[in-house]
Amino acid sequence: MIEIENVRKSFGQLEVLKGINLTVKKGEVVTVIGGSGSGKSTLLTCINGLESIAAGKVVIDGTDVHAKTTDLNKLRQKVGIVFQQWNAFPHLTVLENVMLAPRKVLGMSKQKAEEMAVKQLTHVGLAEKLSVYPNRMSGGQQQRMAIARALAMSPEYMLFDEVTSALDPMLVGEVLDTLRMLASEGMTMICVTHEMKFAREVSDRVAFFHQGIMAEIAQPEQLFDAPEHAETKKFLAATH
Amino acid sequence: MFNTALSWSDLVFLAHGAGMTLTVTAVSVAAGTVLGVLFGVIRFQLGPYWAIPLTFVLDIFRSVPLLIQLVLGNALQSIMKLGWPPFTTSCVVLSLYTAAYCTEIVRGGIDSVPMNTRRAARSLGMTWFQDMRYIVAPLAIRVSLPSWIGLTLGVMKDSALVLWLGLIELLRASQILVTRLQEPLFILLICGAIYFIISLPIARLGGYLEKRWSPND
Amino acid sequence: MFHYTFHWNQALKALPQMLDGALVTLQIALLSMIIGMAIAIVLTLFRLSGSRLLGGFATAWVEVARNTPALFQIYMAHFGLGNFGIHLSPFIALLVGIAFNNAGYLAENFRGALKAIPETQARAGRSLGMTSLQAFRMIVLPQMLRVAFLPVTNQMVWAILMTSLGVTVGMNTDLTGITQELNARSFRTFEFFAIAAVIYYVIAKVVTLAARAFASRMFRY
């Protein structure tokens, strides 16, 4: 369970998160929508401790992420994240990209790590690209590789930060399909996205962020068809 | 604080040396740039394949120590009975050396102008020369300028080697003072400081132009 | 055309001697690169350390190496250290001067290479649970090596060319030094130095091509 309590975060003068409260239960899929600068991406990096927070608390399965005593490296093995820019490691093949962390961080044997990597890459449909270098692949393929790379750590939670925003429109579908598959398998996920149709389909709940505040959170039918907050209505009208 | 035998006239002597460094550099960079632009345009127009002979010859100037080039240049002018003084020989060799580097900078600059921009110019009815003059040159100069400034500073430093042909430039002047006064560190520090003082304005100018001409300006 | 007879035979007879000199040249260049690289790594760490003293020291080193002639740096090693009662042999003075120069230029290259690797790469590693040291060693460093490889190769060629400056401080065992001695005995300046030029050219090309072949095998992405 991920518990976010009154989290505040500023970059210099700008307060990007103004007290966020959100609890995500095991197996739940929560999508976060909102305009740019609404703080939704920052929230994800605060959840896995890549960013520090000014106030509040993030607790994952009883562990306070931002406590000084927390072993963040340990915690991050449990919480996978995939970014908008897929950040493939260009000097490693697809297989090596996925094998690296299981071997070096989890200490798996080469053989086991390879088994795991092949399994995850097959899962995302890249079984034929094992020995290819990332820059020989399309953005969609690289993004799916990044997902496999995170999954190879057997995380219990996955965070997706606008994973389709940097892709050509034609390649968005294949990545969303991968996310749908994960959701249907029961992975606990928080997805920041601009894909409204996708959000409606996969989410248990959809949260709308506006200027650092979670303005509204509800089941997808409720939020998309009968939004309560004025800003949500405005946003949905503009994006449809 | 310092107990030095260095006199005012010695400083004037060093200044003369610095003047010689600057003169040799200015002449060589000017001549080398003219040649470099010429070769660079030829190199670009011919394409990598037909330009091989030119590229090969210019590459020699970049792969053989400058000191050897100076000695060879001097030997050659004496064989050909040209009767050049060391100053002329030094400037000729350094100019060719500069041209070899400048050619690559110019070619890179022209290369950086997108083909479509040039097609646009030509489809407005501009001639090859007009395209070069009004479209390619302004864009290419912006791209090449930082490297060209770097080259100028490099030639200024490399010009120290002309001392081998007997020219008394800054480093040779310092060496003469070192031998006479036996205060090597102090005099060499002054010499190094003068090199810095000469470099700084050129480097600053480069930085300033680069900033002013940056694309998001 | 010219009233001058070229005496190539006499010069070619000295070829074995000159090739011996070429070996010394290579030896100095290689040694100066090894020392220079080691120092450059230390200077880069100094600059990253955040300490003003160490950072300032490294910056000063880099600035002096890049803004004064290589010959000046060799003179400093040869004459300048005399002030402290240190008298280096031409070989050592040349080596120290070139290594000093290499370290400055390489440190600047390393910094550029470090900047060339986007911060998101280390971030991606961290988010997979790697420690910052692991992320640096397994993700940033290998990519840095690729970016820095070409400049390092260029510096090696520069180091070879710089060894020719040894003759000005009395070096007489490297290629230029030996050529100059032969020249002083025979006055066949053009012939001897032309052969030396060819040898330098060949060495420079072999180093460049070998490095390129090595890089294409090493960095296959």
Image: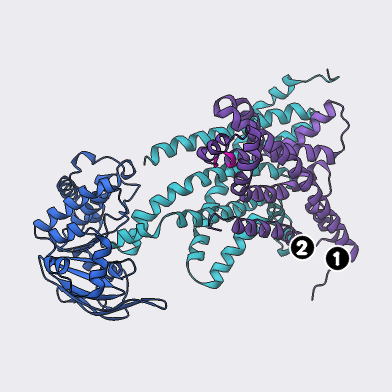
Which amino acid, by three-letter code, is at mark 1?
Answer: Leu
- For chain A, the rendered hue is blue
Query: In which quadrant of the rendered view does residue B190 lie?
Result: bottom right
Residue position for label 2: B190
Q: Which residues are magenta?
A: B109-113
- Examine the rendering and report whether any part of residue C41 can be seen: yes
Which amino acid, by three-letter code, is at mark 2?
Answer: Ile
Residue position for label 1: B6
| Mark sitting earlier along the chain (1/2) | 1
- For chain B, the rendered hue is purple
Q: Outermost residue toward the top? A: C1
Q: Is residue B110 magenta?
A: yes
Determine the secondary structure under disc 1. loop
Residue A145 in percent (x, y) is at 24, 49
Query: In which quadrant of the rendered view does residue B191 lie?
Result: bottom right
Tell me if label 1 and label 2 are in contact, CB under 8 Å: yes
> Can you tell which of label 1 and label 2 is closer to the viewer?
2
